[in-house]
Image (cartoon, rainbow, N blue to C red):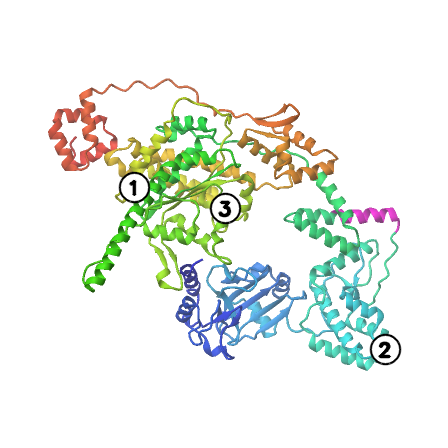
């Protein structure tokens, strides 16, 4: 994110605070000042913004990377430092967390369970810190001139602070005021008089002894005692640990027996020599004074494992006294039949392993969780792996996979002039002909540049910027399809570079001559020669984002097409010329809307500013890389949402030699020459009926987005605008091929919009198919079968060997091991279940899954429409002249030339919009 973006976000954030608010620059959460007394060096909003832009504090010139809010009245920050704070808040407020903390401006660092909610309260309030009972987690009520809360900038352990609830600052809840003033729960409770918990019995086990919850070192000391010289310090540490365990068990509502005094007394009696009773009282008071806010020495997760182990060991014990009686009973009751106990133990472990498999995000997390469980239960990892494999085998039952459907695109309807030529080129190159249109659209957008836009409605203007990606394995033709489109751009680029080279040589000679004359005659008023215009960049393959911004700044709104055969390489190349993390991806995403791009450097002469940008993108992604590139299912940056995806259909890839020359290259040359030759800037509007159609489509996409996952919703919200851009590209192709002429050039009619929406629906179907493929659970066999179907559909056929050597081989081997099959048998079984549209075929010694492409259903034939009346030749000539009319004077001249009678014969054959315009110019007469 560049400085312009961060300042914009900072301004938006600071607007939520009153003008009297004070701020302090911070470096890694600490005030960035020289010496102490940072309270006297605070800044107002204007001063902190200026300091942020410079990157230095105004008084001392020290660098800083964050901004803190001074928590003087009226501000109060509720510092929620850990997930255990939720239970504490519920205990203190008597409400759920959502009700206890009304919606207010909230800042988070990105660490789980940690955030600060900022509230307003003008009254007196005491700073308060309350331990939750979990080590390292606490709830803090922060207020005071000496307190600050970081609200913006970098965090030493995360990607930085961010606003998670972007709303106005709300009044402080009353329960917080009560807790801070000491009139509610949350006061410092005496160490030895904690309230009794509401017992939560652990299964059928008796309450757990308090000493079992101590850390391992403290339990060892409790068992052996300590010799004179270290026994008092050990007793204080054990007392603090035991008190922390009491708090934790109370808030977790776990029944326990024993208390701090009993634990310390037991320890004192085992020391050598024993600790006298009077000394024990002193130790307990010292522990109460120094450990009143501390939690247990053992982390919460480890304590939960201790409790579960106690439950398992004592599952068949009868009820025992609760902690209120202080009668410690640690002897478990008889367990009864050993076979039944083993069965209970196995059931318990199965449930634990099942929970791990269902909640762990990936194989690595499963392995870590199983290792921890094996260590906690004193078992071998192999035993738990066996249970896990058995559970996977029970779960991995192949259900019917989602039906593989391929959205069909009628090229003859979308681009009627080019359809036959695209189909012929597809057969000759062994590629899906839709790929030519897929790459043609961003190429047309590139040549239109920023000067040609579509006005969807007043104030809503879209550039013809399109980003297209084909999802296809390497070697299946996407490069050949793109080269067919790119050949014209390559020729123009070559000619442009040659032109610049010639002019640059001439310029250098002229400059040398001018400098020689200056030396001879001394300084005069002769101007030096003008340097040549830099070469226009039609397309690029490899470039830094900064160089690309520089190129767009130099060619002033003319488009650039960035093509990468593998787009994964493009995204990974953003930072290859920089040390550390750069902001090139953010700049790249910003270019999608054609706005200004600004590269700010320390030296002002090196800064780059492009007032307008126009970057189109084309390329391919291998199917296995899709989930890696778009790894976040929420797509927070919107990278996936900006692309239109194509998964090409399988075609007959056998080489076919054709004697007939391809017509597509020549037709594309004519289209590109025509579009590139238009130099005037123009905004193309939608007719009323076209706008109505687009508006309905927009509403439908927004409605679909509400019921979709975050990534799909982001894509759908952008799709209606993308469809308007495609309508502009189709309109430009119509102009170049002669379908649209004259006055019709500045309007997109309803027929063009219908074609654009049909194209948009095709791309929506492609995206939904991609979503189904990429969001399936990797460990689900029905999902595996779906992915194999997709591979077979893309390539036409898929063999057993290809699957064994592909990305799914690991899962195949695991299933085979569980079921006692060979991997090839698993694959063949899946092939046989592929369903309609696929066939399992034996080919020699191997088996292949073959995709049977079926042509789209053709609508029932209807009787042909009655033939249109034939237009007399003389009227056809008159229509040709009338199509060239551009203004009122041109119409009057045409009528004078044709005569009124011939004009009236030709008028009914004109398009409706042209008829309306001519009628307006003629004052209502035809």
Residue name at image x 47 percent, y 23 percent:
656
Return the disc, 1 or 3, that comes first in the chain's sequence.
Answer: 3
Q: Which of marks 2 and 3 is in front?
A: 3
Q: Say whether residue 761 is left or right of residue 501.
A: right
- What segment carries the magenta color? 336-350
Task: For the N terminus, give its image quadrant.
Answer: bottom left
Q: Does the magenta stretch include residue 346?
A: yes
Which image quadrant is residue 902 in? top left
Disc 3 element: helix
Return the mark for residue 569.
3
The tag earlier along the polypeptide, 1 or 2, is 2
* Residue displayed at 73% across by 67% down: 246
Location of mark 2 (residue): 274
Asked whether the residues under the numbered discs 1 and 2 touch, taking CB atoms below 8 Å apart as contact, a structural biologist would say no
Q: Residues within 10 Å of mark 2 (few under 14, many from 20)?
A: some
* Disc 1: CA contacts within 10 A as few (<14), some (14-19) or many (>=20): many
Q: In this view, does 389 lie to the left or right of 483?
A: right
- The residue depicted at 77 percent of the width and 63 percent of the height is 256
For this view, does 25 lie left or right of residue 786? left
Between label 1 and label 3, give the one nearer the viewer: 3
User: Most prominent secondary structure in the magenta stretch?
Assistant: helix
Of the two numbered discs 2 and 3 on the same chain, state the one appearing first in sequence.
2
> How far across and how far down the image is residue 727, in percent?
36, 38
Residue 694 seen in the figure = no
Which image quadrant is residue 409 in?
Answer: top left
Disc sitting over residue 684 in the figure = 1
Rate crowding at label 3 as few (under 14), some (14 to 19) or many (20 or more) other CA atoms within 10 Å: few
Q: Distance between the residues labelled 1 and 3?
A: 36 Å
Residue, far bottom: 278
């Amino acid at each position: 994110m560049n400085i312009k973006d961060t300042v914009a976000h900072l301004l938006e954030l600071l607007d939520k605070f009153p003008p009297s608010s004070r701020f302090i620059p911070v470096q890694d959460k600490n005030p960035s000042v020289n010496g102490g007394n940072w309270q006297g060096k605070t800044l107002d909003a204007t001063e902190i913004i200026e300091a942020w832009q410079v990157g230095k504090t105004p008084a001392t010139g020290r660098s800083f990377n964050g901004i803190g809010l001074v928590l003087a009245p009226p501000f109060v920050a509720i510092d929620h430092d850990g997930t255990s704070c939720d239970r504490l808040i519920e205990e203190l407020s008597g409400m759920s967390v959502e009700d206890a903390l009304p919606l207010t401006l909230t800042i988070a660092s990105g660490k789980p369970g940690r955030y600060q909610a900022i509230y307003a309260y003008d009254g007196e309030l005491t700073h308060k810190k309350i331990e939750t009972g979990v080590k390292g987690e606490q709830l803090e009520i922060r207020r005071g001139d000496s307190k600050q809360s970081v609200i913006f900038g970098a965090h030493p352990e995360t990607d930085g602070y961010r606003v998670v609830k972007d709303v106005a600052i709300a009044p402080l809840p009353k329960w917080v005021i009560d807790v801070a003033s000491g009139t509610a729960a949350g006061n410092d409770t005496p160490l030895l008089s904690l309230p009794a918990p509401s017992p939560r019995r652990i299964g059928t086990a008796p309450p757990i002894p308090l000493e079992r919850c101590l850390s391992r070192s403290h339990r060892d000391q409790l068992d052996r005692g300590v010799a004179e010289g270290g026994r008092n310090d050990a007793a204080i540490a054990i007392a603090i640990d035991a008190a922390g365990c009491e708090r934790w068990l109370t808030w977790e509502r776990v029944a326990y027996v024993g208390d701090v005094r009993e634990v310390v007394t037991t320890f004192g009696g085992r020391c050598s020599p024993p600790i006298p009773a009077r000394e024990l009282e002193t130790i307990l008071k010292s522990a109460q004074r120094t450990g009143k806010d501390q939690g247990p020495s053992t982390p919460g997760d480890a304590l939960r494992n201790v409790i579960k182990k106690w439950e398992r060991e004592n599952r068949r014990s009868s009820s025992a006294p609760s902690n209120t009686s202080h009668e410690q009973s640690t002897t478990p009751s008889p367990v009864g039949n050993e076979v039944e106990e083993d069965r209970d133990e196995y059931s318990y472990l199965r449930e634990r392993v099942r929970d791990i498999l269902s909640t762990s995000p990936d194989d690595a997390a499963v392995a870590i969780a199983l290792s921890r469980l094996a260590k906690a239960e004193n078992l071998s990892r192999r035993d738990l792996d066996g249970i896990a494999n058995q559970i996977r085998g029970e779960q991995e039952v192949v259900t019917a996979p989602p039906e593989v459907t391929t959205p069909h695109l009628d090229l003859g309807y979308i681009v009627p002039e080019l359809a036959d030529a695209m189909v012929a080129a597809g057969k000759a190159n062994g590629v899906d002909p839709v790929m030519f249109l897929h790459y043609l659209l961003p190429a047309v957008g590139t040549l239109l540049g920023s000067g040609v836009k579509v006005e969807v409605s007043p104030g809503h203007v879209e550039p013809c910027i399109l980003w297209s990606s084909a999802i296809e394995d390497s070697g299946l033709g996407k490069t050949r399809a793109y080269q067919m489109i790119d050949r014209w751009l390559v020729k123009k680029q070559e000619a442009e570079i040659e032109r610049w080279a010639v002019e640059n040589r001439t310029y250098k000679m002229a400059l040398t001559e001018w400098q020689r004359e200056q030396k001879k005659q001394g300084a005069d008023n002769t101007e030096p020669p003008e340097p040549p215009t830099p070469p226009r960049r039609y397309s690029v393959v490899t470039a830094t984002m900064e160089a690309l911004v520089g190129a767009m700044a130099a060619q002033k709104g003319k488009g650039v097409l960035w093509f990468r055969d593998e787009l994964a390489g493009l995204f990974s190349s953003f930072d290859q010329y920089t040390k550390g993390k750069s902001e090139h991806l953010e700049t790249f995403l910003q270019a999608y809307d054609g706005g200004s791009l600004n590269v700010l450097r320390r030296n002002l002469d090196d800064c780059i500013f492009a007032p307008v940008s126009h970057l189109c993108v084309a390329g391919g992604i291998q199917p296995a890389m899709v989930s890696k590139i778009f790894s976040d299912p929420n797509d927070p940056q919107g990278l996936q949402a900006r692309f239109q995806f194509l998964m090409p259909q399988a075609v007959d890839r056998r080489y076919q030699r054709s004697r007939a020359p391809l017509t597509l290259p020549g037709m594309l040359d004519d289209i590109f020459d025509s579009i590139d030759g238009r130099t005037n800037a123009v905004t193309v509007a939608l007719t009323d009926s076209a706008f109505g159609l687009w508006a309905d489509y927009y509403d439908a996409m927004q409605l679909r987005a509400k019921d979709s996952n975050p990534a799909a919703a982001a894509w759908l919200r952008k799709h209606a605008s993308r469809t308007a851009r495609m309508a502009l590209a189709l309109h430009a192709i119509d102009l170049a091929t002669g379908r649209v002429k004259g006055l019709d050039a500045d309007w997109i009619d309803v027929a063009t919009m219908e074609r654009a929406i049909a194209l948009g629906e095709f791309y929506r179907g492609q995206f939904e198919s991609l979503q189904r493929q990429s969001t399936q659970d990797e460990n689900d066999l029905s999902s595996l079968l779906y992915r194999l179907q997709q591979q077979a559909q893309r390539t036409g056929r898929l063999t057993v060997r290809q699957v064994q050597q592909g990305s799914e081989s690991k899962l195949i081997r695991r299933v085979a091991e569980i079921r006692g099959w060979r991997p090839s048998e698993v694959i063949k079984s899946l092939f046989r279940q592929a369903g309609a549209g696929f066939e399992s075929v034996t080919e020699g010694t191997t088996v292949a899954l073959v995709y049977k492409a079926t042509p789209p259903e053709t609508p029932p034939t209807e009787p042909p429409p009655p033939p249109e009346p034939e237009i007399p030749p003389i009227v056809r000539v008159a229509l040709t002249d009338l199509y060239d009319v551009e203004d009122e004077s041109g119409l009057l001249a045409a009528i004078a030339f044709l005569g009124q009678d011939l004009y009236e014969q030709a008028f009914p054959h004109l398009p409706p919009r042209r008829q309306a315009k001519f009628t307006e110019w003629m004052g209502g007469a035809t």
